[in-house]
Amino acid sequence: MKSLNAVTGVLIFLASFFTTAQDLEDRTLLTIDGKDYDAGTFMKVYLKNLDIVQDESQKDVDNYLDLYVKYRLKLQQAYDMNLQDDEEYQKELKNYRSSLSQSYLTDTEVTDQLVREVYDRSLEEVNASHILVQVGRGAEPADTLEAYKKILDIKKELDAGADFAKVAREKSEGPSAGNAGELGWFGPFRMVYQFEDAAYETEVGEYTDPFRTDFGYHILKVNDRRKSRGEVTVAHIMTFDRPADSTKTAETRIRDIYKQLEDGKSFEEMAREFSDDLRTAKDGGKLQRFGSGGLNSPIFVDAALEMDEIGSYTEPIKSKYGWHIIKLLEKHPPKSFEQQEKQLRQQITKSPRARKITQSFIKKLQDRYNAKVDVKVDGEMLQTVGDSIMQRSWKYKPLPEHAQKQLFSIQNKSYTVKDFYQFVEERQKKDFQQYDNKREKVESLLDAFVETSFINYYDENLERDNKDFAFIYSEFKEGILLFNLMEKKIWGKAKEDTVALKKYYESNKERYQWKRRIDIILTQNTSKETAEQVQELLRKGVEIDSIKAQINLDGRTKTIISSGTVEEDYSRLPEDFEIKTGVSKIYHEKEDSFYKVIMVNEIMEPSIKTFDEAIGAVINDYQQVLEKEWESSLKEGHDIKINKRTLKKVKKELAAKTD
């Protein structure tokens, strides 16, 4: 029996422990005038600010709780003064929320996976061939079926042992058919995403099952793989045969140019004068940086990427465009993941890969809201949406039944056919994608309507559905509100009440004192010789402008001269500067590139600053006085209750997290 009681006791203890850990954040820590404030928000604020707190006393939980209570009381004053209704405040909130929400309206997990995937793929290049049977995304079902049967028949031929290159020449409908389907070397972003996926997921010598892209059905074969050769920046001189010029062939001219380069002529000058590529000739033949697949000339690309010595150039080479001499300007080896991550993220969000991110995010939202969406374009939709949609000029004519016909719902919000048609009328103006027919376009717009509806719904309810967003947004919202309150209650009042400021100054003027000051001319010179010249001119009483005119000749600045009254510990004075009237010796410190000469016109002993001289410090000090007076009365008239049991648990939790 004792054993059973012991086990039961342990289970009760463990249950209470886990319950405490789970529900502590939601427990009420303090109540102000009947309004509860939970422990979770307090702990989050405490931990977030722990590293930036300079006053060690504020790290004490009791002291920080006192500050937190005052913070909440100040915010309540702001709401009582209706500062939250200020037009500028609302505008600032709207802009911040719009910016902040963007990072929450995407699938960061999938984005991270895609960034890593692209980087890993960028380290390797693939050489592939393919067979294409063309069929558009918007093709009629019968045409799609015919194309699919055709690609399946081709697959059967290959499975039976047919030569891939031979079949590609005879049956591929793509532009590479004449080249046995070969596409050359490429890396990520060079092909449509589905095609790239197939290429990187297939072993060398193997071919894929049929797959579909916007171009049609493909079978892809991987011929080879190699490490990425990075990118290069090159310049070239190009010649091609001109029908009107029968005196010299392109080859003759390029070899003449090569001979002159060998004799020491400038590559850039020869490119400007003789290159037939007029787009680059004016820039000395310089091309944009590229890597494998970056130019539609494998011979040119290979020759450029195989170069090693910066400044070297090739012998004349022939491409399908003409003859070239290539000069290597820069080599760009593959960068580390950290160096490329930001750029890859930007590329992904602007590429078709972004669809994968959106689709994953929408699926997660549908699961979150337990929303089942099964909508398809029907005959009624195609009849309602006129053919003018193809010219982006369709006008919606509402019918009463449209508002009653629901397409889908998200929680308690219904989305109707009317909502969809209104979306189509507006979205069509921004949709410049080419479609094969109206059905394809309406289907695309229906998909966009569903996605936009889910994203907008989540956006509208972010504060409710995402605790992290709610905390950050609330922190900003309250921070700006508190700033506006301080401006009205303290900062503005302190600046505008000149009578009170002067009274405060008169009572505390001994606190506002000048240190010993000097009226100086400070010269900073680029060499010792210049410093000696300036030193001599200062001793002769030459004016500053005249000194500059005599020293800074031919647009070269050899001396920089400034003047004014500064305190004796002015940072630009030499460390061992001897304060006395007259022209100083030349000072030169190891860490300073300048040779300094200083002329001291007058030495002023310490004195009390005038009100105008001390105004900045007086305002700052008076603001602190007003703030202390205000804070001392903050709690007056308020019913504040601290839940001591919860506070004890909070302290224990914070101690565990900060040890």
Image: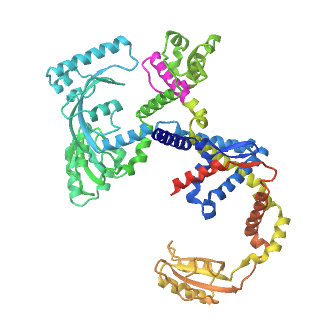
Q: Which stretch did the figure color magenta?
A: 427-454
Q: Position of residue 428 (x, y in %)?
A: 54, 24
Quarter of the image for residue 625 reads: bottom right
Above-or-below relation of 129 to 527: above
Task: Residue at 64%, 86% (x, y): give it.
Answer: 600
Task: Residue at 51%, 71% (x, y): give it.
Answer: 555
Q: Position of residue 421 (x, y in %)?
A: 57, 18
Identify the main secondary structure in magenta.
helix
Q: Position of residue 204 (x, y in %)?
A: 20, 35
The answer to whether residue 222 of the structure is visible from this angle is yes
Above-or-below relation of 298 to 431: below
Q: Is residue 495 magenta?
A: no
Residue 138 appears left or right of 91: left
Front-lying residue, 335 or 458? 458
Above-or-below relation of 325 to 293: below
Front-lying residue, 43 or 428? 43
Front-lying residue, 565 or 90? 90
Quarter of the image for residue 605 reads: bottom right
Quarter of the image for residue 395 reads: top right
Above-or-below relation of 265 to 601: above
Residue 217 appears left or right of 204: right
The answer to whether residue 245 of the structure is visible from this angle is no
Q: Is residue 447 magenta?
A: yes
- Seen as rendered, the residue at the extreme front is 1
